[in-house]
Amino acid sequence: MTLKEAIERLGLHVLTSEEVGDAKVTGGYTCDLLSNVMANCKTGNLWITMQTHQNVLAVAKLKDLAGIIFVNSRQPDEETIQKANEEHVTVLNTDESAFSISGQLYQLLKEP
Amino acid sequence: MVSHYDLSRTFEIKGRDFSKAGYVSINIKEILRELGIDPVIVRRVAIASYEAEMNVVMYASKGEMALKLNPKVIQITLEDEGPGIENIDMAMQEGYTTATDEIREMGFGAGMGLPNIKKNADVFELKSTVGKGTSYNIVIYLNSKGNV
């Protein structure tokens, strides 16, 4: 599953301006504790979180994540979006809860 | 790809400046990646250096991180000027934290930082003087698998 497909199938809103490439989504990880994400999130994962401050970007870069999904329609501030664009981190949001979007992504990734 | 390297770099970390937090570690990760270091090793170094860097940002006034690299070993050292750690044994326990509510609301200060460093390092030495600062010595062997 590519990031592009995942965005389409899950109806995610793309908040960053860079075109979404064909990077592979290897899985997902749902957590709001940054150290836990650093420890356990895998390369190419989509990170599902309610943390919208700019420090999530360094984590995404260090872990080579496919992107970050902010849940419950949460919007980061302009500075975070701008920095995400500069750092080439794909930042997304959804109206769904963390529970719901995690379940949907899980099902999607299980598809043959 | 470089097959032989000897490298030494130092980086300044500003305490309490969340806007730059993590970027020393990103820098280190990029250096290692460009040298063609095994991605598994690079990830372990990134986790360890990030946690150490964040400790400076969260608790100290400033710090200096050094990266040293030879064909066998990656060493990260960090000296900070800050409050120090009163009880290192306690601080090494998962879940123990002295972080403020504000820091914890940002998803930091969950008491996982030092244990994360320990898990990813082959050698981790921590020394601290209360009221002065903390020093870290983190060593990762290029041929090791770690404790993860």
Image: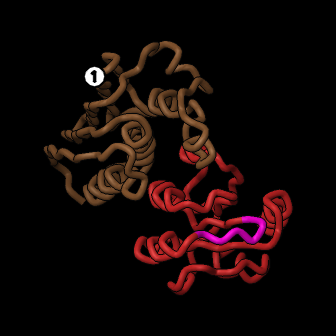
Chain colours: A red, B brown
Residue range in magenta is: A71-76
Q: Quadrant of the N terminus of chain B?
A: bottom left
Is residue B26 one of those drawn in magenta? no
Q: Amino acid at mark 1?
A: Lys
Q: Which residue is mark 1?
A: B132
Judge whether B51 appears above or below B83 on screen. Answer: below
- Asked if one can make out residue B39 in the rendered structure from this viewpoint, the answer is yes
- What residue lies at 44% left-to-right and 47% top-to-bottom? B43
- Asked if one can make out residue B147 in the rendered structure from this viewpoint, the answer is no
- What residue lies at 65% left-to-right and 76% top-to-bottom? A2
Judge whether B105 appears above or below A93 on screen. Answer: above
Residue A18, horizontal then vertical, whole percent: 50, 84
Q: Which SS type dominates the magenta stretch?
A: loop
Is A60 positioned to the left or the right of A111 in the image? left
Judge whether B84 appears above or below B117 on screen. Answer: above
Q: Quadrant of residue A110?
A: bottom right
Residue A6, horizontal then vertical, whole percent: 72, 76
Is B22 positioned to the left or the right of B13 in the image? right
- What residue lies at 35% left-to-right and 35% top-to-bottom? B60
